[in-house]
Image: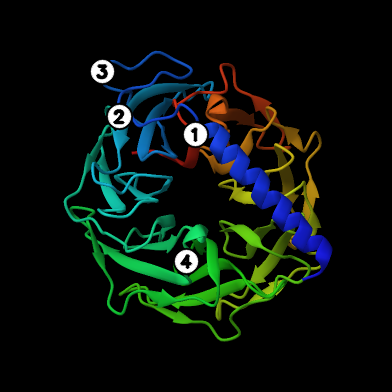
């Protein structure tokens, strides 16, 4: 790694530390309802089919919002502590594909830090499931396979632990139980992970040799067991310090934000082997320090949050996997509103961004499904009372 990249990564680390410190000032866990863009639902039943947005914060809470199906505006419903133990901290989220359960990790130790909740579709309320897990390190990103049979968790990068944990999910209770032979060793400190739409492959971004930092695993569709893919780790040539990673809904491409080199890699995914290969033109230019990545449900557009620029890059995805910036992007976010996570809703009408600092809350946009352009939703940002981390949108 040359001196310029080292300097860039060092400056980025300092900036992120400062943002985290500023956002935490005056913050605290209250476990109470908070009010965003609309009044609290007051415990009444939601209309059938109402989408729900859940946002994890930096002090161990999950905040629930209902989504207005016409405007995309969020109404605050309730807040739930991930755990009452010492395991409180940054909360990352993943949802069961059916919308029946939510899975949360908390960056704390001393108690359960991988927790399952059932979702009440009429109120959005969360009820903790008894069977949860305690990792020996602060838990980070979590992902659930497309059939809802397994969950996979990596530690926070700050834990400096090159491991991954796999769990089976009880189909009735949604509780978690550890798979055999855990944890799995990784080739470097992980940043993010994803499962392809077929459920056959798991990919992990990690810090290692620049341009060679994506680990791939074959997943047993029956047991959830992982085995290292031939050729792993795969080369995202031209990129360094890969962060967010997602697979397009058709399973053809993997999209990765490279934080240290200010670009986005696109790799083709061989369906039979899971091997990843850079597409022509990859990597594609982005803003400064691209980190979270999301893809709309049609696979037509990719969204990449640029942390240092406080901006969102939107790209059209071609049939060959090439990325082209959508007109009007990058979308500028509020000053210092570094994006921590991005989620599209299942109806493909809205895009939401979790941000730093807490005053920015959840930023909401209406998505033009034809052009990919974004229009701010009236009332955005929708505040949750704390700096946010992971966000998901589900239809229970």
Q: In this rendering, would 345 be left or right of 132?
A: right
Q: Which residue is mark 2?
A: 31
Precedes in sequence: disc 2 or disc 4: 2
Cα gap from disc 2 to disc 4, whole angstroms: 37 Å
Q: Which residue is mark 1?
A: 24
Task: Tell me, yes or no, if residue 229 can be seen here.
Answer: yes
Labelled pair 2, 4 in contact (Cβ < 8 Å): no
Which sits in the foreground, 98 or 141? 141
Q: In this rendering, would 285 be left or right of 14?
A: right
- Mark whose residue sits in front, 3 or 2: 2
In the displayed structure, 91 sits above or below 166; it is above
Cα gap from disc 1 to disc 2, whole angstroms: 16 Å
Q: Which mark is residue 44?
A: 3
Residue 254 in the image: x percent, y percent?
A: 63, 63
Cα gap from disc 3 to disc 2, whole angstroms: 19 Å
Precedes in sequence: disc 1 or disc 2: 1
Q: Residue 18 sits in which quadrant? A: top right
- Mark whose residue sits in front, 2 or 4: 2
Precedes in sequence: disc 3 or disc 2: 2
In the displayed structure, 294 sits above or below 221; it is above
């Amino acid at each position: 790694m040359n001196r310029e990249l080292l300097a860039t990564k060092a400056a980025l680390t300092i900036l992120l530390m400062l943002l985290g410190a500023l956002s935490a000032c005056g913050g605290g866990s209250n476990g109470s309802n908070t009010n965003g863009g609309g009044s609290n639902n007051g415990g009444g039943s939601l209309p059938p089919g109402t989408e729900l947005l859940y946002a994890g914060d930096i002090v161990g809470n999950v905040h629930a919002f209902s989504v207005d199906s016409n405007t995309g505006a969020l109404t605050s419903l309730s807040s739930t502590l991930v755990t009452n133990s010492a395991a409180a901290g940054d909360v990352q989220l993943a949802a069961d594909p059916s919308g029946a359960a939510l899975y949360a990790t908390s960056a704390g130790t001393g108690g359960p830090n991988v927790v399952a909740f059932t979702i009440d579709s009429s109120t959005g309320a969360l009820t903790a499931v008894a069977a949860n897990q305690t990792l020996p390190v602060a838990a980070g990103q979590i992902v659930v396979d497309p059939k809802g049979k397994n969950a996979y968790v990596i530690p926070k990068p700050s834990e400096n632990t090159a491991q991954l944990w796999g769990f089976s999910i009880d189909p009735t209770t949604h509780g978690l139980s550890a798979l055999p032979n855990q944890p799995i060793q990784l080739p470097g400190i992980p940043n993010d992970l994803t499962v392809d739409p077929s459920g056959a492959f798991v990919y992990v971004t990690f810090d290692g040799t620049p341009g060679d930092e994506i680990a791939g695993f074959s997943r047993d569709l029956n047991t959830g067991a992982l085995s290292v893919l031939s050729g792993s780790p795969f080369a995202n040539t031209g990129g360094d310090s890969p962060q967010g990673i997602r697979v397009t809904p058709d399973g053809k491409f993997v999209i990765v934000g490279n934080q240290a080199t200010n670009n986005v890699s696109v790799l083709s995914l061989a369906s039979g082997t899971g091997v990843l290969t850079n597409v022509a033109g990859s990597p594609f230019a982005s803003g400064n320090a691209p980190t979270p990545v999301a893809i709309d449900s049609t696979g037509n557009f990719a969204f990449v949050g640029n942390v240092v620029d406080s901006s969102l890059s939107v790209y059209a995805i071609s049939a060959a996997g090439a990325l082209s910036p959508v007109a009007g992007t990058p979308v500028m976010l509020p000053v210092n509103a570094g994006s921590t996570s991005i989620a599209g809703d299942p109806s493909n009408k809205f895009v939401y961004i979790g941000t730093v600092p807490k005053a920015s809350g959840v930023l909401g946009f209406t998505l033009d499904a034809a052009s990919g352009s974004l229009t701010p939703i009236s009332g955005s940002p929708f505040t949750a009372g704390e700096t946010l981390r992971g966000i998901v949108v589900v239809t229970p």
